Image (cartoon, helix red, strand yellow):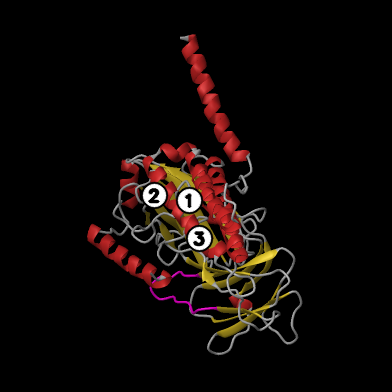
Amino acid sequence: MKKIILLLIVLILTVAGFYAGRMTAPAPRYEPSQTKADDPLDAAFEGFIQAQRDTLALYKTHINFDDPLARAEAYRGLLYTIVGSIKAGALTSHDYPRTMRGVDWTSKAGLDNPDNNYFFALLDDDGTYRLTGKRGNTTQLIFQLVIGVPGVGNAGSSTNVSVLYADQMEMDDEGNFEIFVSPERPEGVANWMKNAPGAESLLVRFTHSDWEKERLDPLYIERLDSERVAPTPLSELDMIGGFERASQSMYDRTASWIAIADRMWSLVPNNSIFNMRVTPGGLVEQYSAFGNFKLTPDETMLIEFGDTGAPYMGIQLGNRWFVSMDYENHTSTLNMNQLGCREDESRCYALISLEDPGVANWLDPAGHDEGLIFMRWQGLDSPPTEADQPRTRVLNSEELAAFIEDLPKVSPEARWEAIQVRRKAVHERFGG
């Protein structure tokens, strides 16, 4: 009996040590593999294939990989990062940049916010660029020049060099604008972002609160300080560099996001959320709060929070790999345009449960009994008060029935119709 107890203690300590190590250790970084290929281009391609295996190993060595749903999502996550890394690493140019959609249904990453349309362009930190576009009618439009590529190498998640908000910009009567990115401000330029050593990624966020009505217009970027000549024909060196950048991006970003997800899971107790705080390294006026949920079929997590009046507020669920859950076919994310506050008080609410409770403000975990919670507030004029902070509790079946008794009910038919509206809006926003 003593031996059995001792073995159990050793097992518990081993598991605890494994978790403690994952939560405190820095995310591993990509190291190029040695291949047997003599040809440099063949070697770069084989390195890209090996990087896919190494990236998959990040999932396979995780304690959650034994779960069938997590396992399937790990393989899909690998496909997401392959697609994203090819676009961001292998097929881009600093001299001939383009604003490309960084995250969509084919390349989810970094607990992407479904309310945001993310675009990015790769820049040289000593270059001069001009970005032109039209404001559109989205809730917010924000331009962010950051160090390196988020999640890759030593860049971290997001380290700002320059940030520019649409409401700070000069535009014509139709909303047309131009922005210059350069080491020094050109004479007579109104909208300028300072380029500085280390800067490499220009991130653009169109934030949609009304999914059905808010639309964006395309952006165009060009480099102004290089020779006005067409790109040279593709070379083997170009492709070697592309494969190497894609390999590093694939591995490093996956390692970074899994490490962040592990911290979000471990730093707060199950079914709770941290207080709002300024988003580290993110937008100047953005506050965020993160937490997690772990529920049984007869439990519901109630989240209550104040109505801050922020131009944008959203709450979303993510899986343990730091990827957004299916927001197209499930209400796994809601913003203040979709949420409602109780009429008799200023606090708003959301409910997480494995089954539909039949009321509004249901965050559907899309088949997950555990996962991450991320709340965002953008454009706050002043720091949040104690009354604004999110608070949580777990309700049993009887407590849930009492809480929703006076709330407007949502029938299965109404829920289905709402999902169809949601799907159409996602398709129109992100395209095919």
Residue that badge 3 annotates: 84
**Region rendered in magenta:** 207-219
Task: Inspect the magenta stretch and tell me whether residue 218 lies in it.
Answer: yes
Q: Tag 2's secondary structure?
A: strand
Question: Which residue carries the number 2 mark?
Answer: 352
Q: Check whether the beta carbons of the residues at disc 3 and disc 2 lie within 8 A of each other.
A: no
- In the image, is 4 to the left or to the right of 222? left
In magenta segment, residue 52 = no
Mark 1 and mark 2 in contact? Answer it, CB < 8 Å. Answer: yes
What's the amino acid at mark 1? Ile
Is residue 265 placed above or below 350 in the rendered structure?
above
* Tag 3 secondary structure: helix
Q: CA distance from mark 1 to mark 2?
A: 10 Å
| Residue 302 x, y percent position in the rendering | 42, 48
Q: Which mark is residue 373?
A: 1
Query: What residue type is disc 3 on?
Result: Gly
Q: Is residue 70 visible?
A: yes
The image shows residue 201, relative to residue 4, as above or below, that is below
- Which of 244 and 219 lies nearest the eye of the viewer? 244
Residue 131: x and y in percent read 61, 79
Q: Write down the quadrant of residue 19 in the picture.
A: top right
Residue at image coords 26%, 61%: 416
Question: Residue 11's spot in the image, x, y percent?
Answer: 51, 23
Q: Nearer the viewer, residue 341 or 323?
A: 323
Furthest toward the top, the residue is 1
- How many other residues sit within 10 Å of disc 1, few (<14), some (14-19) or many (≥20)? many
Q: Badge 2: few (under 14), some or many (20 or more) residues near its Cα, within 10 Å?
A: many
* Label placed on residue 247: none
